[in-house]
Amino acid sequence: MTNPIDPRIVKFIKKHHVFTLATSSGNKPYTCTCFYVYQEASNTIIFTSDYDTRHTREMTLQPLVSGAIALETLIVGRIQGIQFTGEVFELKDEGYDIAHKAYVTKFPIALLNNLVLWGIKLDFIKMTHNQLGFGVKLIWDKSRG
């Protein structure tokens, strides 16, 4: 049996293009922001990062990461955002070609660089969706399906 993600969560992830990635090493947390594309079929966030960045070094040592995507608004009734967890992996071989095409289609400027592409296979998503009511949460958990 499958565990479908609420379509409102998918729509939100697809609508945006910047996420915050949280990593850690030696009990020292770190965050960065990255452009991303979302591959709905595999429930994966695709982003690029060079090998020499702090977050890449940390996520290769500890591939379990978390992140967030938020709508910027000052109107409480419009607040929307997601927090997620997942496992990072480097995209290689045929998976790279599909992800590369999706990434450079959304961000053509990326063609100017040799891209190291990473995926985050999502396993938990919590969406705050105040447009449905103050403090309403939509939750998807891979382990519940």
Image: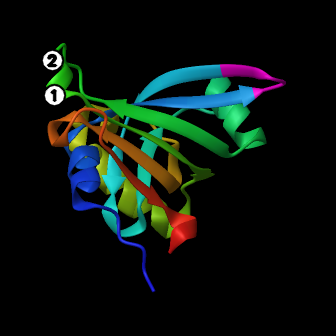
| Magenta span dominant secondary structure | strand
User: Dot 2: within a 10 Å radius of its alpha carbon, few (fewer than 14), some, or many (20 or more) residues?
Assistant: few
- For the view shown, which residue lies furthest in the right direction? 26
Which label belongs to residue 54? none
Marking on residue 75: 2
The correct choice, above or below, for 104 with respect to 22 in the image is below
Q: Is residue 28 above or below residue 96?
A: above
Residue at point 22% right, 53% down?
8
Rendered location of residue 85, percent (x, y): 55, 46
Residue 24 placement: quadrant: top right
- The extreme top residue here reads 74
Q: CA distance from mark 1 to mark 2?
A: 5 Å
Q: Is 134 situated left or right of 45 in this image?
A: left
Q: Please tell me how crowded label 1 is: few (under 14), some (14-19), or many (20+) other residues with Cα within 10 Å.
A: some
- Part of the protein shown in magenta: 25-29
Under tag 1, what secondary structure? helix
Give the secondary structure at mark 2: loop
Q: Nearer the viewer, residue 33 or 124?
A: 124
Q: Position of residue 122 (x, y in %)?
A: 50, 55
Q: Amino acid at mark 1?
A: Arg
Residue 92 visible in image: yes
**Dividing the image into 4 quarters, which one contains the N terminus?**
bottom left
Picture residue at 44% right of the left edge, 41% below the top: 47
Identify the amino acid type marked 2.
Ile
Would you say residue 73 sits in the magenta stretch?
Answer: no
Q: Is residue 49 left or right of residue 65?
A: left
- Return the mark for residue 78: 1
Residue 4, how many percent across, how many down?
A: 35, 71
- Label 2 near label 1: C-beta < 8 Å? yes
Residue at 50% over, 35% down? 67
Q: Is residue 113 visible?
A: no
Q: Could you tell me residue 69's position as x and y percent?
A: 36, 33
